Amino acid sequence: MIRVGGKEHPWRPGLTVAALLAELSGPECPVVRIDQTYVSRPHFDHTLVPDGADVFLIPMIAGG
Amino acid sequence: MTDYRLTLGKTFAYQRPSIERGYANQTLHVDLSALEVSTRPVTPQMKDLFIGGKGFDLWLLWNAVKPTTRWNDPENALCIACGPLGGTPAYPGSGKSIAATLSPLTGSVIDSNVGGYFGPYLKFSGFDAVEIQGKSQADIVVYVDGIEQTVQVYSAMGLPEDAYTLSAVLTDHFAQGKPRNISVVSAGPGAKNTFFGCLNFSWYDPKRQRARYKQAGRGGIGTVFADKGLRALVARWDAGISVDTNRPADRERLKAVAKRHAREIVALDPKQNEMAVIGTTHLVTIMDDHDLLPTHNFRFGSHREAANLGQAVFRRLFDPGYDGCWMGCTVACSHGVRDFVPLSGPYAGVKVFVDGPEYETIAGCGSNLGIFDPHTVIELNFYCDAYGLDTISVGTALAFATECFELGLITREHTGGLDLYFGNRAAALAIVHQMARGEGFGAVVGQGVRRMKTHFAERYGADPKMMADIGMEAKGLEFSEYMTKESLAQQGGYGLALKGPQHDEAWLIFLDMVHNFMPTFEQKAEALHWFPMFRTWFSLCGLCKLPWNDIIPEDNKTTSEPAKVMKHVGWYAEYFSAVTGRESAPDDLIRMSEAVYNFQRLFNLRMGFGRRAHDSLPYRAVGPVTELEYESRAERYDKQLADTCQADIKNLSTAEKMALLRMHREQQYETLKDAVYRRRGWTPEGIPTLATVRRLKIDFPEVVALLAAHGVTA
């Protein structure tokens, strides 16, 4: 099990960030934070989400 | 202990007015030439049209200078203002000061929004703004004591040169046992000896028992400060500040909206960017991932070593604890490094506390110089602050000089024997120390990119065309630290910014390039209208923009305009209404800014550079200058040529493809200018029309005459 934005979400071996976001089917998100690590869209396909992770969807409309 | 002497030269006693709805209703004027201190009334028209903060600064400055005034003329005024909402402890990000003057880099108005306690303390002492004119031969300290209701002018001898020790010494000197009551504004030796000096604004950190500071960095405001003979400007006020101190029109309404925003940040920041833990350092790897992190003088947007400068590193290096640069701010992003020991310069081997680094400093003094060692970045950060140097201009100017060296445009003969290649950490530090002393090649770099281009061409025979393409300045100001090659909207965000390429007007890269929120010219123009206006509003009121869109509501993505975070805009309208009693809706905030924004554009015109030609960019900001840059992203550029330009590129050389791409991209930027000027109500020359200035009620006789002199009569 992982948590996404504080809510529980099922985990499975081999779960990538891209697959997770597809399961969530929300608006597009350019950056996620997995625990204390930030992962950007170019790395979504090959970044695995570990079991027990806290995942946060970072909106990235700010900056500067 | 430093051996110094402060000799009282003038005492001006005044009766402190009570604050009413966020205003003191007077400003303080100090003439350093005549050693005169006086107060001036804030008129209803000033409040109605210019609101406060930067708006007041601009109005005071407009009345102080002439079109012929230069940055180092005595009549140039250095203005610092808070704003009607500034000094509210309950609402996050409400302690900003806004400084403005004529810039030594650009020749026109520069403004900078900065944390620390000075602006609120000044206002609560009885002044919505301070305006300093004249010049002194002696070193001067101006002390505004709101508790005793006096302004004192001291001549100073033997004070520490650098801001790091100076802030500590003066805090101790004036504190009367309560250091939290003191805020010090100071520059440093680098400000005196370069054109991009910054100002340090202090606040006292009771937990760490030391003066901390934030910087008004851009455009050489510190250089003007030092040139006037000012060593420091000090404010004293009782730190026991509450929501009542501003005497808001509706206290309960203010408390309600402040609580809502403060609590939301506490709840959501840990789920979003963790600014209370890592500040803006999260941006480093995110920018790198999206090819937006400037490396090697903005040649490239990513580097394999970027993670060495990322949040994971600074998460470990920052001293844990509360780091709000204003009382009670729940964003609290002003982090620092405790017990840092520099390897070079006057503090070599001495433990110091370094305020920072933030993203801009990491990118400017790190990746853009090819430096990926966090400790060198921290050391550069420390010395830039202590010397009173803007880390952004230092980074961008040094990156330009370094590329000139690598291209052979300048040699060791010109750099005083320094091998100025990217990644040379020792050389970067050596040059910063030279800047502080006004010596060697550091003195040349300290003139800024625009003057360096002339210097290198005229004295060393360097190729002016190449330098025009790679010298990252516009209007004379060095670029801040984002790559814009692939975001036309952000090219506009930099090129069309009033003071020069600083991201505080519009940061549209992600909205444009990653989210694709604005595919058409009209949509980009709309963004380049709305965002600069709303961002300007923060500086009118004495606020930080971070609480607006760096931590956003969880339901923001389902709103009709997520980029604008309209829920928060509504809260800001509520905040403004509650303090000032001037009932305002979100659109009213935009209209407030529009008047000031257009006035600043006209101010530029008055100073000789508010026209279309002045909104141009170096080509490095638009596309690849060298074959190396093109080839490194050939797939991207080839695709654009094929898709957008419908060009048959099969038989073209790289040089031919680059020329085609350049023609296309430069044309796109000119088309964008047309669209933005139309949206802003400006002529095709980039000048506000008479109808625009009338609509905004800034059609003062002097403004109408200025427009007529430039052929604008309708």
Image (spheres, rainbow, N blue to C red):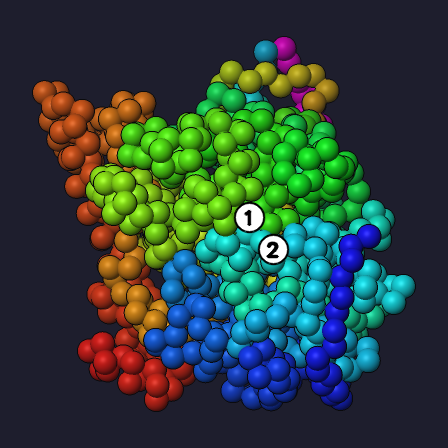
What residue did someone put label 2 on? Answer: B188
Q: What chain is tagged by disc 2? A: B
* Whether residue B194 is situated above or below residue B403 in the rendered picture: below
Residue B567: x and y, percent? 59, 57
Q: Nearer the viewer, residue A41 or B664?
A: B664
Work out whether residue B581 can be spotted.
Answer: no
Numbered range of the magenta stretch: A1-13
Disc 2 marks a residue whose amino acid type is Gly
Instruction: Using the image, tell me which numbered label, if any, was put on residue B197.
Output: none
* Residue B395 horizontal side relative to residue B174, left or right: left
Comes first in the chain, label 2 or label 1 = 2
Residue B674 painted magenta: no
* Label 2 in the same subunit as label 1: yes
Callout 1: few (<14), some (14-19), or many (20+) C-alpha neighbours within 10 Å?
A: many
Q: Nearer the viewer, residue B296 or B571?
A: B296
Q: Residue at x 70, y 22 (%)?
A: A53
Q: Are marks 2 and 1 in contact (CB under 8 Å)?
A: yes
* Whether residue B84 is situated above or below residue B333 in the rendered picture: below
* Whether residue B585 is situated above or below residue B350 in the rendered picture: below
**For numbered disc 1, what is the local secondary structure?**
helix
Label 2 to label 1, Cα distance in Å? 8 Å
Q: What chain is tagged by disc 1? A: B
Instruction: Using the image, tell me which numbered label, if any, was put on residue B436.
Output: 1
